[in-house]
Amino acid sequence: MVNLELRRDRIVARWRDKKTEWVIEPRYWRNPTIGISLLVILPIFVYSYPHILTMFTTANLYAAIAIPLALQMLGTGRVNFGPQLYLGIGGYTAALLNLHFGWSPAMTLAATIAVCAVIALLLSPTTLIAKGLYFSLITLILPLTFLDVTYIWGDIFRGEVGLVGMSPLLTFDKVSWNYIAYYYLSLFLMLMYLLFCDRTVRSRIGISMAAVNENENVARMMGVRVDIYKVFFYVAPSILTGIVGWFIVHTFRTFAGVTYLPLDFMTKILIIVIVGGRAFLYGAIPGAYLISILEDSLRGLGPVNYFVFPLILIALIVFLPRGEGLWGLYKKRRPRDYFPKLHVRRE
Amino acid sequence: MSNILLQIIIYTVIWGSIYLLISLGFSLICGVLRIFHLGYGVVFVLAAYVTWFFMENMHLGLIPSIGLMILVQCAFALLVFYKGVFQRYLEEEEVLLTISILVFLAVAHLANYLYPVTAGVSIPSTIIDNVLSIGGVTIDYQMIIAAGVGILVTAIYVLWFMKTRIGLIIRAISQNLPAALLMGANVNRMYYLAMILSVIPPTICMIVIAPFWGVDPFMGMSLLMTAMLISILGGLGNLKGSIVASYLIGFIHASVSFIFVSRFMGLAALIVTLVVMIYRRGGIFAGETLW
Amino acid sequence: MLEITTVSKNFGGLAAVSDVSFSVHEGEVVGLIGPNGAGKTTMLNLICGIYTPDQGTIRFDGTDITGMPSHKICRLGISRTYQIPQPFESMTALAGVMVGVLNGKHRPNMSVPDAALEASYYLEFVGLFSKRDTLARDLNLYELRMLELARALATTPKLLLLDEVMAGLNPTEASHALDMIWSAQEQFSFTILWIEHVMKIIMNATQRVVVLQYGKKIAEGPPREVTSDPKIIEAYLGAKYAQH
């Protein structure tokens, strides 16, 4: 089916008549390997504090939402102000099917993917039709409208209170092992997303997508099928976000629209992408960890934290070097890499 | 049947006029400064809670509180939004929009923390505490007054933009900034003026509708959403478009409420907006200029 | 190869192009000239599928391309350069040309390193290989125009539409650019439709010119004939000069 060939410095994969080459450059692997190893051995230090493990799991999930969002913004060339819509759709699909029909997590996963795909395809014309700013506004409004829907049909969705008691993905006898298992699962999910997005950005699709982000009309004139790319880059990240919703449902076993759909949550995710720096994809991980730790530490303050948290986020944006963000603090720029600029307002 | 029709007509006019008040300031900023002011909801929150603060904690009367509150509003709009956010992040719009939302969230949560629901915040601005009956329909006098105020304020604004010199300058800036600069318009001062002008209608709106709409720290968000839908529908930044779209959305809300169930109002408005966007990109009066 | 038949395009009340017909045969170099505002760039945009004509048809190699989406037109073999260079600013020169290589034809078998190789070839052809890792926003005007040429060549065109390539170049750069276009045509053999204001180029380079004014075609023929026609002189310089 898929032929893999190992050459001296690259892996060549062939599928039917398509060929992909993955260049292996050892120096590019050193830092990611260190980073991933750190994340993998993390639980060893904190396994007796399930509270901290949950915080890290949440961080992984935040990153898992931010990474497809970054990919989507690069690929469609538009800023999406409502990534949490598919989180809500995926989560509710999984939760409702599990609670009312008793579907297993594997089946709800399939259902989540299907539902998100259908809805994303239905909404994908907005990337083509709406001008950049209108697209951003529509994406802003949609999750809030969905939140309204969960209130309207409150008997099904239990908008305010949320659904509880969904089946877990896995259970161990020792409760603390659950937390560790969920951490590793979320880490795996996030790393898979990172791998997928990284591969996409470095592939031929990624280069064409960068061109679309820069100047759509010129890209069209060079033969790039802009419309198909935009639909792909809208639908695929939406499905990935929906899967995160599924994960939340079966890990935390409660899901309330009011937690994930309103603006507060949205700003958290957007901040992660924005302060992550221009190399959006990779900066999302330190950004997510920062936000998650911040959020958790502030919780101790009591109700004031709802007021303090936005202020700290504003401070983050204002004081971190804008173009480079967190990632830039660490990585030297290589001239050959592409650092895209986000455009809100465009044709 | 005719009762329902009458209700729909009356509420279209009333809600449309109130929505006009809400979206006027938003359209103004959109059309003149060309910035989508996602922090616009702050104006409503400040209007309600700062007035309450002056009345309850400083024991001032209603009118002085309102006067002081307007000063606070203008200061907030100019210092926090214009100087702090817009001027700094004009080039990076996604940051600008995100910070605006964050400012709104901070202010709303602060209001929520200082004056939770139990504090019973309300603004006693009822002018006539009575009801009027037309046909079989009863309406609060306050609502009629709110609608009337809406129409009056809009008329004043439109006349001001059409007839005065400064209004002309602002319209020129909104249509073609470089040309206006070449003609010697003091653009910065006009932007300050536009910010202040944009703060006034929502403040007035909050004061008049507080008696029957209730006061809630997060109502800024839902009112902002209505303003946004009206702007998208009517054409970003276009006053004519806002007027038409306000009554259109008022009509949609009224019909859905009285013919079906009122819970679907927001959803219906959103669907109609999306449909219009398909056929007429840019809204009813596309062109992003003020008039 | 390219047949334009009674094409018209209106923008609101303005007739940008009205009732224009001409054709370009394979291997020719045809010039499109006319005063500013005559509708030359609009004509180019119509051929490229950016605008759809209100009337008339455009046929390329027998296929009707009127109103076809731009990417299909590119795949059929038409490329263009832009009057004001439109590079992909945050991408390096190499990456910009790679976009053309990957998307200009149906190439399922091409991987990124292969595309980089082919893009390097085009860059080297126009003389930009040493600048392949420079961001496009850091290139000067001449290099930008060469980059546009490389990008257009990378999509393997049969018909190349050039839009005022010489504008803004000093005489040395202009002659380099001209040489480059010639060697490109020799090597890759395509047809050229050339919008230009510099008369010297039109005289020496083209075999035939089409003249537009106010959106209408007012003359067509070999360059020397056309430019000595009093009607054309009047169009460019005014009635006063047409007398002699």
Image: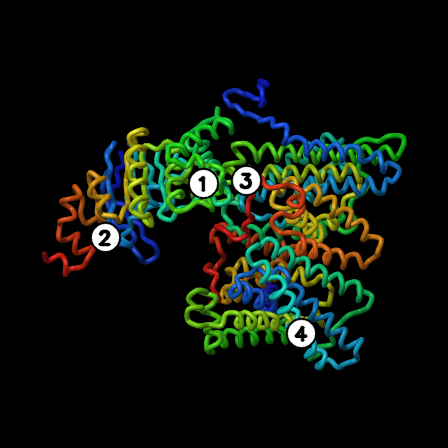
- Nearer the viewer's eye, disc 3 or disc 1? 3
Asked where in the image residue A331 lies, by quadrant, the reply is: top right
Label 2, on which residue?
Answer: C213
Of residues A299 and C49, which is closer to you in this image? A299
Q: Secondary structure at mark 4?
A: helix
Q: Chain of mark 1?
A: A
Q: Determine the CA span between mark 4 and mark 3.
A: 58 Å
Q: Which mark is residue A335?
A: 3
Q: Chain of mark 2?
A: C
Callout 3 and callout 2 share a chain: no
Q: Secondary structure at mark 2?
A: strand
Q: Secondary structure at mark 3?
A: loop
Between discs 3 and 1, the one toward the N terminus: 1
Callout 4 and callout 2 share a chain: no
Where residue C26 appears, x then y in whole percent?
25, 32
Callout 4 and callout 3 share a chain: no
Q: Which mark is residue B208?
A: 4
Q: Amino acid at mark 3?
A: Pro
Label 1, on which residue?
Answer: A219
Q: Chain of mark 4?
A: B
B88 sits to left or right of A243: left
